[in-house]
C-alpha cells in the first residue's frame, strides 16, 4: 500500500494557477519560435536602415543641395546677361535712328526684322508722342514669351523703347529649380524624422511578430505538455495501484499519441496479468 497521501480534487484557484504555470519545455518552444520569427525581421530592419541611410545620404548630399540652390542664381545671371544684350542692341538701334522721323518707321521695321527676339520698337518724342514704331507680327519660334523692355534715352529728348522676347519656359524653369531646392532643404530637415519613423515602424513590426510567435509557441507547447502531463498523472495513478487508468491519445498520430497508446496497452497487459495471477491463486486455494 502506498504511503502517499490520498490525492483529492484540487481547489479551483489551485487548478487555475497550475494551468498558468509555464514549464521549461514550453519556454524552450516559445523562445525557439520567437527567435525564428524575429531574426529575419531584425536583419530586415538592419538592411532597411542601411538602405535608408544610403538613400538619404544621396538625396541629402550637401553638394547636391548646394548645386540645386545655385541653379536659380545661374538662371538669374543668364537673365541679366540677356537684358544687357538687349540693352546694347537697343542702344545700337538708337544710334542709327534717322534725323527725319518720317523715315523712322521704315528704319524701325528693318531693325525689328534684323534683330533677334525684338518684338516691337517705338520712337517717342520728349512729350511722349510716338514718332515712329514697328512691330514683328510673326510668332516666336520658341512658343510663349514674356516682355523684356529696353529703353534708351535719346540726346535730343525723347526715347527709343524696345520690347524683346524672353521664352516663358525660362521663367518656369527658374521657378521649378527654386521649388526643387526648397523641397531638398525641407527633405534634409525631415531626414532625422524619416529615420526615426522607419525604425519605429520596423521595431513595432518586430515586436508584433515576437508576440504572435510567442503566443503560437505557447499554444503549441501547451498542447504538447498537457498531453505529456496527462501521461505523467496516469503513470502516478498506475504506480498507486489504479489499473483502470487510461490516457486519451486523441486523433493525433504523433509521438505523444503513440506513447499514450503504448501506455494504455501496457496498462491493459498489467491488468490482464494481475487478473491471471489472481485466478491462479484462487484455483490453488481450491485445491
Image (cartoon, helix red, strand yellow):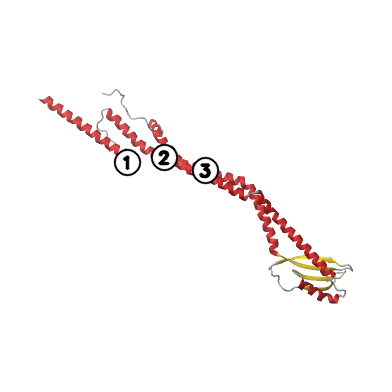
Q: Position of residue 145 (x, y in %)?
A: 71, 66
Front one among 176 and 249: 176
User: Label 2 vs label 3: CA separation?
Assistant: 20 Å
Q: Position of residue 198 (x, y in %)?
A: 56, 46
> In the displayed structure, does residue 223 sit left or right of residue 170?
left
Q: Secondary structure at mark 3?
A: helix
The residue depicted at 48 percent of the width and 44 percent of the height is 40
Q: From this viewpoint, which residue is outermost toward the left?
A: 287
Among the two numbered marks 1 and 2 on one chain, the one whose residue lies closer to the N terminus: 2
Residue 254's disc is: 1
> In the displayed structure, does residue 117 sit left or right of residue 9?
right
User: Label 1 vs label 2: CA separation?
Assistant: 17 Å
Rendering quarter of residue 139: bottom right
Among the two numbered marks 1 and 3 on one chain, the one whose residue lies closer to the N terminus: 3
Marks 1 and 2: CB-CB under 8 Å?
A: no
Instruction: Report the residue marked by disc 3.
Output: 204
Q: From this viewpoint, which residue is outermost toward the top?
A: 3
Figure quadrant of the N terminus: top left
**Dot 3 crowding, Cα within 10 Å, few <14, some 14–19, many 20+:** few
Instruction: Report the residue marked by disc 2.
Output: 217
Amino acid at each position: 500500500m502506498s504511503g502517499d497521501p490520498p490525492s483529492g480534487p484540487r481547489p479551483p484557484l489551485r487548478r487555475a494557477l497550475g494551468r498558468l504555470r509555464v514549464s521549461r519545455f514550453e519556454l524552450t518552444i516559445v523562445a525557439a519560435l520567437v527567435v525564428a520569427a524575429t531574426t529575419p525581421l531584425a536583419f530586415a530592419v538592419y538592411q532597411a536602415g542601411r538602405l535608408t541611410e544610403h538613400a538619404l545620404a544621396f538625396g541629402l548630399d550637401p553638394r547636391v543641395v548646394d548645386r540645386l540652390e545655385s541653379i536659380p542664381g545661374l538662371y538669374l545671371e543668364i537673365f541679366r546677361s540677356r537684358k544687357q544684350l538687349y540693352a546694347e542692341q537697343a542702344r545700337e538701334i538708337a544710334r542709327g535712328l534717322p534725323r527725319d522721323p518720317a523715315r523712322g518707321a521704315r528704319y524701325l521695321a528693318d531693325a525689328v526684322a534684323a534683330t533677334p527676339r525684338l518684338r516691337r520698337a517705338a520712337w517717342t518724342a520728349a512729350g511722349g508722342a510716338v514718332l515712329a514704331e514697328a512691330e514683328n507680327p510673326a510668332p516666336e519660334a520658341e512658343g510663349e514669351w514674356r516682355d523684356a523692355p529696353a529703353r534708351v534715352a535719346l540726346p535730343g529728348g525723347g526715347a527709343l523703347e524696345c520690347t524683346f522676347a524672353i521664352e516663358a519656359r525660362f521663367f518656369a524653369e527658374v521657378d521649378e529649380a527654386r521649388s526643387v531646392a526648397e523641397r531638398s532643404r525641407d527633405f534634409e530637415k525631415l531626414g532625422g524624422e524619416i529615420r526615426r519613423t522607419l525604425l519605429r515602424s520596423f521595431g513595432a513590426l518586430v515586436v508584433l511578430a515576437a508576440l504572435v510567435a510567442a503566443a503560437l509557441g505557447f499554444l503549441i507547447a501547451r498542447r504538447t505538455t498537457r498531453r505529456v502531463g496527462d501521461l505523467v498523472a496516469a503513470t502516478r495513478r498506475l504506480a498507486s495501484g489504479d489499473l483502470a487508468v487510461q490516457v486519451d491519445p486523441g486523433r493525433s498520430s504523433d509521438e505523444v499519441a503513440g506513447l499514450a497508446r503504448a501506455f494504455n496497452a501496457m496498462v491493459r497487459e498489467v491488468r490482464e496479468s494481475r487478473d491471471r495471477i489472481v485466478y491462479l491463486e484462487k484455483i490453488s486455494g481450491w485445491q
